[in-house]
Image: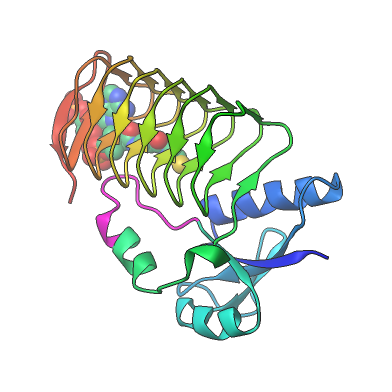
Amino acid sequence: MSRKVAILGGLGNGAVVAAAIEHARRLGATDLEVAGFLNDRAEVGEYIDMFPVIGRLEDTKRLLDEGYWFINTILRIDGNRERIAMFEALNIPDDRLASFVHPMAYVAPSVQLGVGTIVMPNVSMSPGTKLGKGSIMMVGAMMGHDNEVGEFCHIAAQAAVGSYLNIGKGVHIGLNATVRENLTIGDYATLGMGSVLTKNIGNNEIWAGNPAKFLRYAN
Ligand SMILES: CC(C)(COP(=O)(O)OP(=O)(O)OC[C@H]1O[C@@H](n2cnc3c(N)ncnc32)[C@H](O)[C@@H]1OP(=O)(O)O)[C@@H](O)C(=O)NCCC(=O)NCCS
């Protein structure tokens, strides 16, 4: 029997993740079935790509009672603290956060995926890495070995992330960025698209460029 999943979000990440789940479902590779989106910025009944908006964020309580599972895709690229707090305030129990690994991803057997994590097609995750609750590996991202990745991180498409890293909570690693091994990236930090990171990043800092330099603090 399939598990009905409500995706928090919509335009952008939400629709992208929903389509990947639907693709996997058609391949017979997941028991998740996307019911639609929970979204405070769209009309209920409106379609976003393939799926309708089925409610507002406040409807999570009702949908919990109705047996739904949940996936969170709401994020902000330049400082994600408030969006994560908003999600945490919904108090969705961990055992109702669905994780999803697309069948075209490589995830080494010793990788530990937290609840509510998403691993998209063409991702590669090497041994000994832990991906925290609610974190997302977008299409084609590469994650090295023996990394500690915190909760609600977003590793954008085609990012190449080295090994022995300590990545905090709510970190965004930009599209096609590269991260050297043995570094620490602080909570709610952002690394810009296409950047090459060779130094540690502190909490709330936004770095960009090649080599990446401090740009500003997250709002
Ligand atoms: C780093 C980032 C958050 C900065 O955004 P911002 O604060 O709006 O920055 P601005 O666009 O105002 O740019 C400020 C300066 O930094 C430079 N800059 C911005 N992003 C850069 C990047 N990734 N690499 C190099 N330089 C960059 C700009 O060219 C500009 O330089 P200037 O002052 O000499 O003109 C953003 O550019 C970025 O990279 N976002 C990530 C995109 C991404 O990963 N998308 C995934 C989609 S899910």
Q: Is residue 12 above or below residue 203?
A: below
Which quarter of the picture shows residue 85? bottom left
179 with respect to 219 (left or right): right
Q: Residue at x 56, y 56 (%)?
A: 14
Colour scheme used in the picture?
Answer: rainbow
Report the predominant secondary structure element of the magenta stretch: loop
Q: Is residue 156 above or below residue 29?
A: above
Which corner quadrant of the figure contains ligand 1? top left
Q: Residue at x 77, y 46 (%)?
A: 24
Q: Is residue 117 magenta?
A: no
- Determine if residue 117 is in view: yes
Please state which of residues 101 and 139 is positioned toward the viewer in this rendering. 101
Which quadrant, please, contains the N terminus? bottom right
Q: What residue range appears in magenta?
A: 73-82
- Determine if residue 12 is in view: no
Please state which of residues 193 and 75 is positioned toward the viewer in this rendering. 75
Q: Is residue 217 above or below residue 181?
A: below
Q: Position of residue 58 (x, y in %)?
A: 45, 82
Q: Is residue 81 magenta?
A: yes
Q: Position of residue 12 (x, y in %)?
A: 53, 52
